[in-house]
Amino acid sequence: MPQWLHTFGDQYLMWNEGPLIWISDVLILLTGFGIVFVLTYFKKWGWLWREWLTTVDHKKIGIMYLIASLLMMFRGGVDALLLRTQLAVPNNHFLDAEHYDQIFTTHGTIMILFMAMPFIFALFNIAVPLQIGARDVAFPYLNAISFWLFFFGALLFNISFVFGGSPDAGWVSYPPLAGPEFDKGPGENFYLLALQISGIGSIGTGINFLATILKMRAPGMTLMRMPLFTWSVVATSLVIIFAFPALTVALALLLLDRIVGTHFFTMAHGGDPMMYINLFWIWGHPEVYIVIMPAFGVFSEVVATFSRKRVFGYTSMVASLLLISVISYFVWAHHFFTMGAGADVNTFFAVASMAVAIPTGVKIFNWLFTMFRGRIRLELPMLWTIAFVPCFAIGGATGVMLAAAPADYQYHNSYFLIAHFHQVLIGGVVFGMLAGMYYWWPKMFGFKLDDRLGRYAFWFFNIGFYVCFMPQYALGFMGMQRRMYVYPADMGWNTLNLVSTIGAYLMGIGFLFIVAQVLYSIKYGERDVTGDIWDGRTLEWSLPSPVPHYNFAVIPTVTSRDAWWEMKQTGQIQALRPSADEIAPIHMPKNSGRPFILSACFFVAGFGFVFEWFWLAALGLLGVVICLILRAFEYDDEYHIPPHEVVETESALGRL
Amino acid sequence: MALAEKHVTPGGSARASSIEYRDPHQSVRIMGFWLFLSTDMLLFACLFATYLVVRTHTDGGPTPHEIFDVPGFTIETFLLLTSSFTGGLATLAMRNGHKKQLMAWLIVTMLLGLGFVGLEIQEFVADVAEGATMQRSAFLSAFFTLVGTHGSHVSLGIGWMFITLLQVARRGITAVTARKVFIVNLYWHFLDVVWVFIFTVVYLSGVVM
């Protein structure tokens, strides 16, 4: 091997770190070649570009978010299994300390920002315009930009694994540990820039969906007639808009410290590391409500549909969502009670944190009362919803324990905390997102996911969850701290750790069943011919599955909550079916390749900043500016679908 | 886009009569831009908070009192506030359908903005020459970042206003160009408001304290 290649390989590709990296390199190359080969062999490049990379259709963007988040769930899950394998037995040296640090960092970051966030955005995109009777979101072009910024942010983050080195200062990336003095090399830069790029996309999505819901509802769809999932998106979008700028600033200032040499968070020259921690959690705590509230929305839809009852306490459901989004801003300091802010500050944040349990409890009881005397069908979405209730109740209760500031001095950063937040994030967000995925899958693809394989997945994942995390509560009380990569044999932690690891693998098997279920169902899944496979209540079920790209041939007029259910009950389905003479030309946005190119330019710029190759960063930013200017001068970005085309599509679907 | 005309209600009657709100496809974008401005406001709020936390952390280096140049920031303030007024006159001319006036006021606004940015660059260069660099202390890091972020917003706004000007020149005052002029002016006024806070929180209290 020539010397320069050797140097390059060791410095950038980390070939000196051993077989894990080599295997990853080989797998990535093989997958890459495989994808290129398949696309070339089946002549699908044009299709990929026209149908997916340039699309501004919210339904397709939703599907891309979904695929990306499932892939990221796989990556984050493999990270989790590596961590649990390392901790299975005492004095283990499966991973060394450095690799363990990198893997818990990527596990946390990926699961929150590149799994949970795109998953909620997937459901936003798939369901919201259909639920409110709109043909697309308010800003379809911005929607595509949001997706591609997320995509390239995630790509930048993941590339660090094989090029340059992963970040290793935890998913919170606290300085001074993450600062220039203690964490040299590109790893943390990858974290900062990847989150920055995808964060811009998230802000765009928040603005987009709030504007969509406030301005584009069908006639008659007043705010208090909106489906509860749509309400959860309102609350979530508000929190995104008000929380993400704090993350932007926290990341930007830390990046300045790292590459410009400023002193915001350094130990010397007057820097204040606690300022980062405050800014981070001013975003970070609302962020966990950002990911949980859409799950609440899904549960509200699922519970009503599968209990065949309207949801209990609709108004209190809306009020509690909005209350949660307000309180979410007054709890951030509970992440660092041990900072020593004093009893008065800690008391305020402790009481505010406990107060979150009130609106959340209201919601839990409302779901239970909806089920009460309902005619419950235990389909997959409902199974996950029912599993969520006890899981989230336990997670919420341990949350209140953690919120008690004096007691928190004992639990802080112990495995008790780890168990708590995994219980609310898995038991709440992941269960909710899976319920939503099962619920809207037929709407997206026109077939149902196989029930039997889904039940295997459900039981493996649920049993695995309790086996994995219940022991961690105990381990926390026994003194085991988070982020320790190895522990001695005489602490009494051995059995519980082994049990926990077994639980993690059970969850891994559950995930594999979901993969198998998807693959099996593509061929054998029950086809949805009516468009209303669950006997649904809201407007999206009045449309065929999959939905034609213009959604509604004629915009419906809404007269009540659960509009579609009411129409079915009163025999007025025909009112929603278009008649040929009613169909007018439909105004649609044109596809554009620019969101993809613009975001790729952001990627190039981000990559340049990571390695402090400022010429490359400048080149990338120049590309961004050119894209923006071209967009400013673009006037011809919309077209009309002629009525006869709509009539043809609708008659082919048997709806005319 | 699926914006059914009939169910989008523009705000009050004053708005309904002005050109930038008349087409619902355009008015929804104005609303989206207001939402964007709220995110930008919070971005500045976080920078202000950071500045307030570390403004006394001068680490033995230059203090606010030593580096702030009263005539300099007074003229900057004067230029920027005036430019906000002329930007408002541009919107007024647009609503009255006077294309040439609109373009003239946009040009005046941009020139005043350029003057502001020029003075700010001069101020920064002078500070650095005295050894007050970003890397010197936490106070200076926060000062340059907060004021610099505002300055780069203004610079971007000038470029944006220029692009909008070209479109007005080419296409005249249409529903689309009117919305664009209105939005770039919203942005401009917003930066003016941010500057009022920078003027008081950073410069005035820095000189006084």
Image (spheres, rainbow, N blue to C red):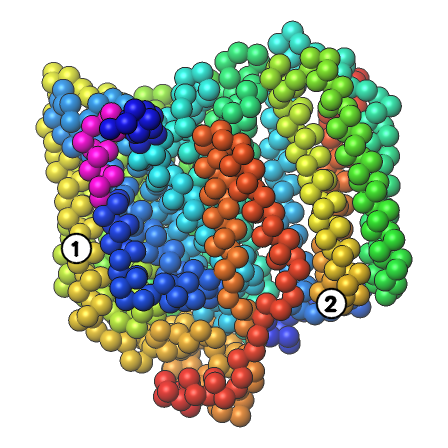
What is the magenta range?
A15-27
Magenta stretch mostly in which secondary structure?
helix
Nearest the viewer among B52 and A397 is B52
Residue A600 coordinates in the image, percent (x, y):
47, 48
- Image quadrant holding the N terminus of chain A, namely top left
**SS at mark 1?**
helix
Q: To which chain does the residue with label 1 belong?
A: A
- Image quadrant holding the C terminus of chain A, namely bottom left
Residue at image position (78%, 25%) is B122
Q: Is residue A408 above or below residue B66?
A: below
**Could you tell me how many numbered marks the image carries?**
2
Quarter of image, res A531? bottom left
Q: Is residue A392 above or below residue A524?
A: above
Mark number, residue B175:
2
Residue A23 counted in the magenta span: yes
Residue B163 coordinates in the image, percent (x, y):
72, 53
Residue at image position (64%, 12%) is B58
Tag 2: residue type?
Ala
Front tag of 2 and 1: 2
Q: Which residue is mark 1?
A: A513
Q: Is residue A122 left or right of residue A23?
A: right
At label 2, counting other C-alpha atoms closer than 10 Å, the crowd grade (few under 14, some 14-19, many 20 or more) is some
Tag 1: residue type?
Phe
Residue at image position (14%, 56%) is A456
Q: To which chain does the residue with label 2 belong?
A: B
**SS at mark 2?**
helix
Nearest the viewer among A362 and A535 is A535
Q: Is residue B186 visible?
A: no
Residue at image position (73%, 18%) is B127
